[in-house]
Image (cartoon, rainbow, N blue to C red):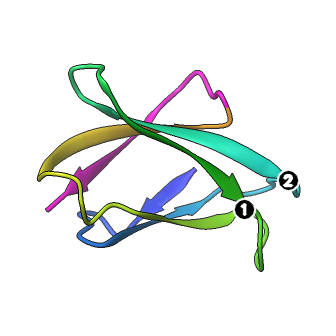
Amino acid sequence: MRLFPQPVTEELNVFMEGMMEGDRNYNIYAVSGEEIRRGRLSTTGKLGYFRIPVSDLLQGVYLITIGGAETASRFVKL
């Protein structure tokens, strides 16, 4: 999974290479482990490419998981 831009201010772009069509759940966590947001992504346009609005998040470091993945990816919100 690739996340960009880093750091992010408005929308987090997520690219998941080789992802098949279909909906995926996502979860965003504070580094403390507290779940901040959950949502559902739907493939439209380019497969495996999503935009998640994050402008309402406070500045800080967050973790995101998509589709129940066991590993999380880190992003920084300004």
Q: Residue 67's mark?
A: none
* Residue located 63% across and 28% down the image: 69
Graded by Cα atoms within 10 Å as few (under 14), some (14 to 19) or many (20 or more), the crowding at tag 2 reads: few
Q: Nearer the viewer, residue 41 or 20?
A: 41
Q: Is residue 5 above or below residue 67?
A: below
Question: In terms of sequence position, does the residue under pointer 1 or pointer 2 come before the other?
Answer: 2
Q: Is residue 73 magenta?
A: yes
Element at label 1: loop
Q: Is residue 47 above or below residue 67?
A: below
Where is residue 5, by image quadrant?
bottom left
* Residue located 45% across and 58% down the image: 3
Q: Residue 48's mark?
A: 1
User: Is 48 on the left-hand or right-hand side of 15?
Assistant: right
* Mark 1 and mark 2: Cα distance apart in space: 9 Å
Q: Is residue 39 magenta?
A: no
Give the x, y percent position of residue 19: 80, 53
Amino acid on which disc 2 is placed: Gly
Amino acid on which disc 1 is placed: Gly
Give the x, y percent position of residue 23: 78, 50
User: Is 44 on the left-hand or right-hand side of 76?
Assistant: right
Element at label 2: loop
Give the x, y percent position of residue 41: 66, 55
Q: Which residue is mark 2?
A: 22
Q: What segment is highlighted magenta in the picture?
A: 68-78
**Mark 1 touches mark 2? (CB < 8 Å):** no
Where is residue 46, by image quadrant?
bottom right
Q: Which mark is in front, 1 or 2?
A: 2
